[in-house]
Amino acid sequence: MNIQETKLSGCYIIEPKVFGDERGYFFESFNKKQFEEVTGLSVDFVQDNQSSSRYGVLRGLHLQYGDAAQAKLVRVLSGEVLDVAVDLRPESETYGQHVAVKLTAENRKQLFIPRGFAHGFVVVSEQAEFFYKCDNFYNPKAEGGVIYNDQSLNIDWGIPEEDMIISEKDQQLPTFSSFEKIYSAL
Ligand SMILES: Cc1cn([C@H]2C[C@H](O)[C@@H](COP(=O)(O)OP(=O)(O)O[C@H]3O[C@H](C)C(=O)[C@H](O)[C@H]3O)O2)c(=O)[nH]c1=O
């Protein structure tokens, strides 16, 4: 597998080695030993999630606070999404910066998102099956996030705002500056 660190430390783009033959293809979608050797990180995933969404669905920007923080390894099983990870680690040099990566069933790219990041994606194909591994369990009491269109984050989601399908809950997420006040009060 090819693992490249993004401009956000600890956030990696992973491209698995694909073995194709007349039957189809095979690839290792995760290998703890290789991942830890290349990144120097130690990761133990405990929960797998999967969601299905149609074109325009935007899920995010979400994170879990404190001890419930989750690192995630995200990928697409079918379709295409623009995946966004925002560095919200207060001590980070790239605090408030984000990476946006197109994940598709064809490019088989994965994004490793460390704890302390907000995460979201928008579906740019007709339908997308989204799969991800988490290194901590779901804790609804520790859920938080930032509104997807926060001006200071300045994320280009790549599709017209009028095409977006966003849950009521996500439309109520705080701005980045409000998030900072919430986070500092925790
Ligand atoms: C995240 C999660 C949700 N749920 C339940 C709670 C709700 O009844 C239902 C849908 O949850 P939600 O609307 O929060 O699902 P998403 O909007 O896809 O949330 C995810 O969106 C972005 C992309 C993320 O990175 C997070 O992992 C996660 O927040 O599933 C669970 O039972 N376990 C879970 O781990």
Image (tube, rainbow, N blue to C red):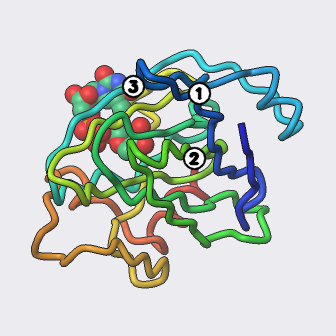
Label 3 CB sits under 8 Å from any ligand 1 atom: yes
Point 76% across, 55% down: residue: 5
The label number, if any, that marks residue 19 in the structure image: 1
Q: Amino acid at mark 3?
A: Asn
Point 40% across, 56% down: residue: 61
Q: CA distance from mark 3 to mark 1?
A: 25 Å
The secondary structure type at the circle numbered 3 is strand
Q: Residues within 10 Å of mark 2 (few under 14, many from 20)?
A: many
Quarter of the rendering occupied by the N terminus: top right
In this rendering, the label closer to the viewer, 3 or 2: 2
Name which residue lies at 50% across and 65% down.
Answer: 100
Q: Which residue is mark 3?
A: 49
Identified at 40% across, 31% down, the residue is 131
Q: Which residue is mark 2?
A: 111
In the foreground, 17 or 117: 17
Under mark 1, the amino acid is Phe
Q: Is residue 56 left or right of residue 153?
A: left
